[in-house]
Image: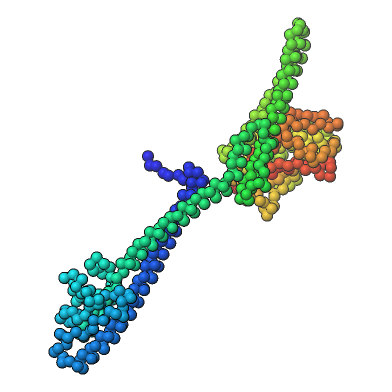
Amino acid sequence: MKYRFDNRRLPLLWRTIFLLTIVVVISQIVIYIWVQHSVSGHFEQMDSEIITHAAFNLRKRADYFNERTTATLPLSSTSSAPLYPDDLHASWSDYNLKILVIDRQGHRLSSAPSGFAYELPANFDLWSLWQTHREQQFVTKINDRNYRAVLIKDEQILALIALPIDVHHQYLLQFNRQLSLILLAITLLLVSVAALSVYWGFAPLSTIVQKMQGINPERLDERVSVSDMPRELRPLAESYNLMMSKLEGNFASLLRFSDNIAHELRTPLATLGTQTQVMLSKTRDTEEYIEQLHHQHDTLQQLSSLINNMLLLAKTQKGLNDSQLAPVNTEELIIKLLDYFELIAEDRHLLFKKTGSFEMVLGDEGLLQRLFANLMSNAIHYAASDSVISVDAAIEDPSELQPIKPSNISTAHRSALIITITNRMAQPISQAEADKLFERFHRHHTTTNMHAGSGLGLSIVQAIAQAHDGTVSIRIRDHEYFAVSVKLYLAQV
């Protein structure tokens, strides 16, 4: 099995140190090479200028002695007479220059200092060096010493000018050693400062970690102080506080839901138990048993409806997968429901009015039918007598659409259909009271109509809408009109 390194397993501190160390080391290597090249270049340039100046002076002196010798001596005697005085090296003694002059036959004419010629190896040949380097400066080694040298030549002589550079090499070696130590110290200092900065900068995260480790149902109200956090970590602290607020609200809702479930189940079960005990207390007529069975049947139906509603809520909260989605004709769906509820509405002298363009939406037809059936049933039960219940449809303006993050249905940048069911209420309620209707087991009682179901109707509507990535909202208009709007996304044809 091939092992693959995953740096995400490393702590943030070590990842930062590792990356910074690589960057600093590469930077220090570049600096080291650049400084070394600059210093070496400076010494080479300085040595080159000394040798060039010495070569220029030697040429002038050679021309001078050649002219004087030609004028005073016969040509046949020039090979044995010294052309250069012994003080040839006097003007360059400050630079410790070495000079060797030979004639065309290889005989030594002059040397500066005078013992330099005798220090040369026996196989040292200036003419072979001339064939290789001519008048170009070069570096050579003579008797374990390094020299920068140049060869100059005229019609009669060949001269070697050599400048010892061992001192420069020793200086560069010491300089490089010190430079390496300085750069290493700087690298360690930078890495240490970076490590300390990262550790100190992310220290506030330990506060959030401690808060998260201490989360329990009794301490959901604790929050992180955003003002104490660095500016870069404040969004994280705000997100944590927002998460805790939602968690606290959801946990409180769950507790209320559990209490409500227990209450809703306890009442019919207690009724069944009481009725059974009463019937078993003594022998009764057949008609009494039949009547009691009818009562128990109604109670069992109430229990079955409650359980089915709870199962539907759990099902819709999990969302819908692609296999459950299909184009749904809202026109046919609404007409079918209106035909069903029309007879019920006539008993209360209510009329349905359908307007707008009902388009194809993407969803589960059975769930959408349950959604609009719950809304129409509530509208009938809470509407004022002799009023009109309107069912309107409209396409949302595409220019007003905001890109949203889809969950299980791709809804980004898609047009939406908004279906609004409006009725005039028998007894007005406030917007705050209307918003509470989405809470599970919340019942709104009126003095004119005491209809109260299980309190899950609008919770189911909201859950079904959210399962379709849609929304549902309630608006109170003119203090007497109750409008419920459902937003669903159009099917792409």
Query: Residue 485 or 386: which is nearer the viewer?
Result: 485
Query: Residue 231 or 484: which is nearer the viewer?
Result: 231
Please say if 361 is above or below 317: below
Query: Residue 33 or 410: which is nearer the viewer?
Result: 33
Q: Is residue 184 left or right of residue 250?
A: left
Residue 1 at x, y percent in the picture: 37, 39
Query: Residue 483 or 63: which is nearer the viewer?
Result: 63
All told, the count of numbered labels is: 0
> What residue is rendered at 66% in x and 51% in y?
402
The answer to whether residue 297 is seen in the rendering is no
> What residue is rendered at 25% in x and 76% in y?
113
Please say if 283 is above or below 402: above
Residue 158 at x, y percent in the picture: 22, 80
The answer to whether residue 230 is seen in the rendering is yes
> What residue is rendered at 61% in x and 50% in y?
232
Q: Going by the picture, which residue comes out furthest to the top?
A: 283
